Image: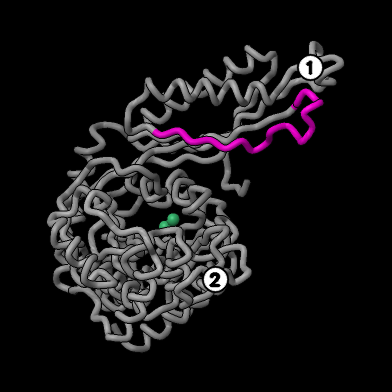
């Protein structure tokens, strides 16, 4: 990559790191990126799918159309001083603990390289998709629901990681919602018979769901948080109470079924307590449809590009963060799809940062956790790449990831991702049979099913 690009990209990533913002409120981050992209000759469409901060920056004309998925939101509770290898809050409410300042900027880097490639081509379009609210908010799901990816041939994404690898495997479908119970307040000692407790309903619902656990699939997950316990006075029968649920399963249809079983339990809790109940839908994500054809393209490009070259200084820097994490990485924590776990364990023991391209076996096994990339993968063949931007040890959503976010190793991982994504795009433009093959595989995997967004039509992008 040209030196001038590297400097511009590092500058953007650092500016976004300096301005960590929550989902659908990434105004400064989106402004920094869209202004740059306009200067670089991209046509920018803002506020896509009514997301406020979502944007599409396009370059080129006609097919093939390739979407590159960019993210830029941050996480609460992770304000941390840069480069300090011990817990050191910087007073900010948020921090880039998932490396999305790198993610978005790396995609922009790939976009610049693809733009240069497309300059003298007759046909071919690259769409940099600025997708807000990945951590909370389901930004891409709204964009997919709105048809943003309908005319796209293939989509690529990447994510900062502790490893240089292809991100294979599926992810869980999920629904997040609130159950709000309404009862009748009364003096808890003097006239309890007149009261109807919304807090009782929340407790009975949680107990009911905890009994449900024995009768659901082992890969289903249900989590909850009591968001309103009804107040601080035990001598009042609590008239209002609320519990937030996150329900996950391996596919959209299974997730919807599980969601309805949880609703039935909530209805039962309302009936038992003489209260009424509302379900307030918050967000929903689709499972990921894998695409081995595109994984093979990224694999070939990664092998060709090689991993970043680290200086002694980089390694000493990574070692400080590696040493800050006391939990040893064990073999059984490594993803099942890693081809040679012995080699990877050896690297983890001898190097503070991933020093080689970790080959993986194709996997369509559903990993625990969800991402809104899943929604894009239901509309268009989609694959994600990982590059190591951080030392071994602490994983995503840690202060260590925030602290390393402006470092030389983070930038090297980001620039490598940009290079590989651009190489993959060029391969697709040069050989459209890749698209045909990827689409055939996609069709086969959907097996007649079509994308149905997990978020109902009446729900708009929102911050709760
Ligand atoms: Zn994250
Ligand atoms: Zn992330």
Say if 134 sits above or below 350 in the image: above
Mark 2 / mark 1, whichever is N-terminal: 2
Q: Secondary structure at mark 2?
A: loop
Q: In this figure, what is the number of numbered marks? A: 2
Q: Which mark, residue 88?
A: 2
| Residues at marks 2 and 1, CA–CA distance in whole angstroms | 49 Å
**Compared to 330, does 444 lie above or below?**
above
Residue under label 1:
195
Residue 7 spot, x, y in % from top left = 40, 85
**Residue sitting farthest toward the right:** 190
Q: Is residue 433 visible?
A: no
Q: Is residue 131 magenta?
A: no
Disc 2 within 8 angstroms of ligand 1 (CB): no
Q: Secondary structure at mark 1?
A: loop
Give the class, few, some or many, for how many residues have Cα within 10 Å of label 1's Cα (few <14, many ≥20): many
Range covered by the magenta-colored residues: 221-239
């Amino acid at each position: 990559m040209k030196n001038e690009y590297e400097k511009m990209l590092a500058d953007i990533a650092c500016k976004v790191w300096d301005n960590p913002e929550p989902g659908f409120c990434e105004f400064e981050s989106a402004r920094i990126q869209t202004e740059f992209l306009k200067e670089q000759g991209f046509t920018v469409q803002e506020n896509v799918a009514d997301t406020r901060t979502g944007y599409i920056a396009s370059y080129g004309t006609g097919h093939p159309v390739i979407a590159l998925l960019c993210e830029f939101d941050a996480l609460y509770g992770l304000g941390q001083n840069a480069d300090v290898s011990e817990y050191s809050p910087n007073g900010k409410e948020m921090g880039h603990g998932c490396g999305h300042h790198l993610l978005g900027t790396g995609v922009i880097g790939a976009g610049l390289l693809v733009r240069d490639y497309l300059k003298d081509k007759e046909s071919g379009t690259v769409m940099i998709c600025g997708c807000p609210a990945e951590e909370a908010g389901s930004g891409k799901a709204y964009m997919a629901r709105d048809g943003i990816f309908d005319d796209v041939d293939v989509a690529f994404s990447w994510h900062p990681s502790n490893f240089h690898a292809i991100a294979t495997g599926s992810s869980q479908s999920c629904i997040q919602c609130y159950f709000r119970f309404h009862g009748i307040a009364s003096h808890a000692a003097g006239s309890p018979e007149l009261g109807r407790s919304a807090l009782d309903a929340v407790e009975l619902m949680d107990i009911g769901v905890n009994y449900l656990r024995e009768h659901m699939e082992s890969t289903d997950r249900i989590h909850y948080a009591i968001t309103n316990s009804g107040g601080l006075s035990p001598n009042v029968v609590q008239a209002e109470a609320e519990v937030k649920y996150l329900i996950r399963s391996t596919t959209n249809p299974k997730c919807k079924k599980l969601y309805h079983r949880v609703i039935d339990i909530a209805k039962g809790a309302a009936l038992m307590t003489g209260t009424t109940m509302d379900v307030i839908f918050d967000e929903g994500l689709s499972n990921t449809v894998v695409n081995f054809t595109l994984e093979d393209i990224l694999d070939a490009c990664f092998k060709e590009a090689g991993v970043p070259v680290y200086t002694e200084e980089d390694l000493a820097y990574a070692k400080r963060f590696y040493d800050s994490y006391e939990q040893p990485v064990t073999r059984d924590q490594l993803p099942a799809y890693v081809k040679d776990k012995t080699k990877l364990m050896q690297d983890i023991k001898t190097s503070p940062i991933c020093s080689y391209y970790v080959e993986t076996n194709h996997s369509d096994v559903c990993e625990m956790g969800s991402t809104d990339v899943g929604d894009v993968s239901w509309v268009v063949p989609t694959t994600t790449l990982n590059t190591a931007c951080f030392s071994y040890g602490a994983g995503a959503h840690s202060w260590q990831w925030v602290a390393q976010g402006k470092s030389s190793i983070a930038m090297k991982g980001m620039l490598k991702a940009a290079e590989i994504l651009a190489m993959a795009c060029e391969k697709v433009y040069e050989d459209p049979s890749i698209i045909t093959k990827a689409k055939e595989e996609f069709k086969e995997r959907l097996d007649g099913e079509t994308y149905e967004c997990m978020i109902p039509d009446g729900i708009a992008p929102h911050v709760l």
